Amino acid sequence: MNQYNEKSKNKLLKSLITGFKLFFAKHISEKEFFRSRIVIWLLALNLVANIINWTTILIFINRLDGDIILHYNVYFGVDSLGDWRRVFILPAIGIILFMLNAALAAYFYTRKERIASYILLLASLMAQINLIIAAVSIVMINY
């Protein structure tokens, strides 16, 4: 039974990777998406923001055996405690949102909906900035 679950997980992972490859090969092969300066700047800023988020957490979060504060509320104080590894959910969410919005932006850009693709990339950048603020606040609460 356990081998069946592993095989099905591997097949699902391979099909997802193949689907992403086919999607990007179809939409990015035209390369019109990467000719726009606005797109290039927004993609670069998104990547830089996500890298800043990862490095902030990697540098400043102490790897302790005990719990750290994951959320603090002004009215109620500490809301959530947990393992230090749970902090890495923030940049992981950021990279997932970035990939999803970049894929949708490429799709809309090839359909001549350039404003929609710019808005998607800008929304992804705003989400990255919010996640940086959340990561910095977690670091500040724990020091």
Image (tube, rainbow, N blue to C red):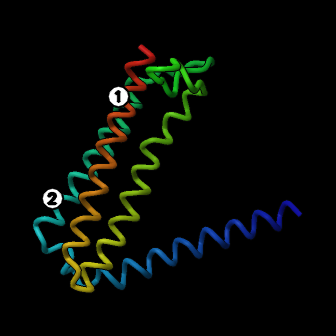
Q: Is residue 52 above or below residue 79?
A: below
Q: Residue furthest left?
A: 37
Quadrant of the rendering where the C terminus is positioned: top left
Q: Is residue 93 above or below residue 111?
A: above
Q: Residues within 10 Å of mark 1 (few under 14, many from 20)?
A: some
Q: Give how far across and how far down residue 92 sits, in percent.
A: 46, 47
Quadrant of the rendering where the N terminus is positioned: bottom right
Q: Amino acid at mark 2?
A: Trp
Q: Give how far across and how far down residue 53 sits, in percent.
A: 34, 38
- Disc 1, SS: helix
Mark 1 or mark 2: name the one nearer the start of the chain.
2
Identity of the residue drawn at 42% across and 26% down: 138
Q: Amino acid at mark 1?
A: Val
Q: Disc 2 designates what residue? A: 41
Q: Residue furthest right?
A: 1
Q: Give how far across and how far down residue 131 sits, in percent.
A: 37, 41
Camera-nearest label, 1 or 2: 1
Q: Disc 1 designates what residue? A: 136
Q: Residue furthest front?
A: 75
- Disc 2, SS: helix
